[in-house]
Amino acid sequence: MTYQIQSTFDENFKIIANTNPTAITLTTTYQDVPDSHIDYIPSPSSTHVVYQFSAYFASNQGGDTGTLEINCFFKLQYSDDNGATFSDFGDNTECYIGSAASDVSQRSTIDLKWTLSATGWTSAKRLRVQSKQDTGSNTILHELETFFDSTGERTDTNKYGTSVSCYSVD
């Protein structure tokens, strides 16, 4: 679903939510993160665009505890040609998220938010996140690993609904 809102504070707000995202097991090579794509044109008077992506990551070991740390790299990319080719956005749009210990319950929601310059951005850009895991990690995105469902039963098929949004600010 896509929603667009007009506001005097946040201009040209666009959000895409997915309640049943595709889970992805990370490797040590950067790969596209499902449901992180959004096509966006800033409002004409804006100076910045805020890109935000909410997701979930966990150990892919199964059970309540894992034997490996979960350490992930994320980076923001853009395309000026409707997704045919992508380039790294650069300008401090990479981050590292990880756990400091093993044999603990290893899962967390993440909320990546980048403020991007809108200078010269006058046509549509497609934005996306790519991710990879650190060597020795075993990480899955978007899937609740052996979580309790609404009836209190343990399951490994629940998904964490993702969202991606953009808005322009003056």
Image (cartoon, rainbow, N blue to C red):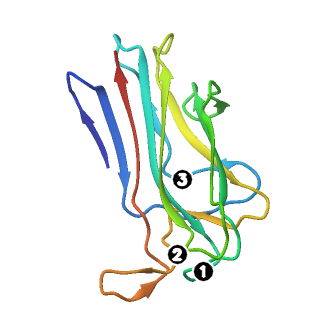
| Label 2 secondary element | loop
- Residue 49 lies left or right of residue 67; in this view the side is left
Q: Which mark is residue 145?
A: 2
- Position above or below: 43 against 66: above
- Say which residue appears at 60% left-offset and 80% top-offset: 62
The residue that disc 1 covers is 62
Residue kind at label 1, given as amino acid type: Gly
Q: Earlier in the sequence, mark 2 or mark 3?
A: 3
In this view, 142 is above or below 60: above
Q: Quadrant of residue 6?
A: top left
**In percent of the image, x 60 and y 65: which residue is there?**
140
Where residue 17 appears, as percent x and y from the top left, is 36, 51
- The crowding category of the residue bearing disc 2, from other C-alpha atoms within 10 Å (few below 14, some 14 to 19, many at least 20), is many
Q: Are marks 1 and 2 in contact (CB under 8 Å)?
A: yes
C-alpha distance separating marks 2 and 3: 18 Å
Q: CA distance from mark 1 to mark 2?
A: 6 Å
The residue at which mark 3 appears reads as 34
Foreground mark, 1 or 3, reads: 1
10 and 105: which is toward the camera:
105
Q: Is residue 64 visible?
A: yes
Crowding at dot 3, Cα within 10 Å, few <14 / some 14-19 / many 20+, comes out as some
Residue 80: x and y in percent read 57, 24
- Label 1: few (<14), some (14–19) or many (≥20) C-alpha neighbours in 10 Å: some
Please tell me which residue is depicted at 62% across the width and 41% down the height of the picture: 95
